[in-house]
Amino acid sequence: MSRLPHPDTGELFDSPVPPGTGWPDDPADAATPVARGAPDVARLAAAAAGSRHLDAAISACLACPRLVAWREDVAVLKRRSFAEQPYWGRPVTGFGDEHARVLVLGLAPAAHGGNRTGRVFTGDRSADWLYIALHAAGLATQATSTYAGDGLRLVGTRVAAAVRCAPPANRPTPAERDTCAPWLAAEAARLWPGLRVVVALGGFAWDASLRLVRAAGGVVPRPVPRFGHAAEAVLGRPGGGDVLLLGSYHPSQQNTFTGRLTASMLAAVMLRAADVADLRGPLDE
């Protein structure tokens, strides 16, 4: 297949995008180590010298054959409306403040969202809803997220996914979930000292957040907190102190088209997160 122009830079790329070929914000290069199974993921996540090295290793991961095949097939076949664009087609890293007070956690990149743009929660309807709410809460400098390199900056906030590859039917297997978990654990380890709030978008992310805290040596109360929209649970943060877990229905079209989640409902959760983390008020920029 011929190379196609990036919608912002106009530079030509293959789909999927090989590491180190110039895609905006690509952390990897041809020398980045590649995880080819669960042991490699655990080893590389633990050995990453810093956020850039961790993101590079995440973005080059080949550990889950089913997910690799799916994300790459989508990058080749594409959606008709994006047929003239290159697709990232690789794992998608976290995005935002490396010293975040708020972590927004989703399930996985969307096949034609993050899997296309190379940035989590970007370029689809879910992203539209999320970033309008983050901007209203003063946690994002723009109310839109269209592609990596579009100038968006998050304020005291980081957005990530529990699973880093787009899964078929948005359903990773338990084995895929567990294989990917060390990437999130390593990312969170750099956030714990200052992290005040985790916003879980959906039940999968809520459960992943509880597992994340337990695995890092934090405290999850009993009975185990149950997910719900605007649900709250105070968890013992690894290293000491508390972190507030907030639940929100995922801004998927299944929820937003049916009215199960409204813009005001999502905005209220993000405003609550901003308030708890002492990151208040909409931005003027």
Image (cartoon, rainbow, N blue to C red):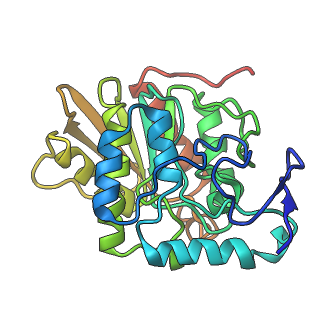
Q: Quadrant of residue 15?
A: bottom right
Identify the residue shown where x is 82% and y is 68%: 82
Q: Nearer the viewer, residue 141 or 160?
A: 160
Residue at the extreme left: 222
143 displayed left or right of 166: right
Name above or below for residue 197 compared with residue 180: above
Q: Which residue appears at 16% of the width and 39% of the height?
A: 218
57 relative to 127 in the view: left or right: left
Position of the C terminus, as image quadrant, is top right
Instruction: Give the number of callouts.
Output: 0
Compared to residue 282, the image places residue 108 above or below, namely below
- Please report the residue visible at 42 percent of the width from the left and 71 percent of the height from the top: 64
Nearest the eye: 273 or 9: 9
Residue 233 as seen in the image, left or right of residue 271? left
Q: Say if residue 227 shows up in the picture.
A: no
Q: Quadrant of residue 114?
A: bottom right
Q: Position of residue 277 (x, y in %)?
A: 41, 25
Query: Residue at (51%, 64%) from the top-left corner?
Result: 165
The front one of 71 and 205 is 71
| Left or right: where 239 falls relative to 42 | left
Image quarter (top left, top right, bottom left or bottom right) of the N terminus: bottom right
Residue 208 percent across, percent down from the top left: 31, 56
- In x, y percent, where is residue 103? 43, 39
Of residues 3 and 106, the one drawn nearer to the viewer in this rendering: 3
Viewer can see residue 211: yes
The image position of residue 32, as x and y in percent, is 51, 47
Residue at far front of view: 31
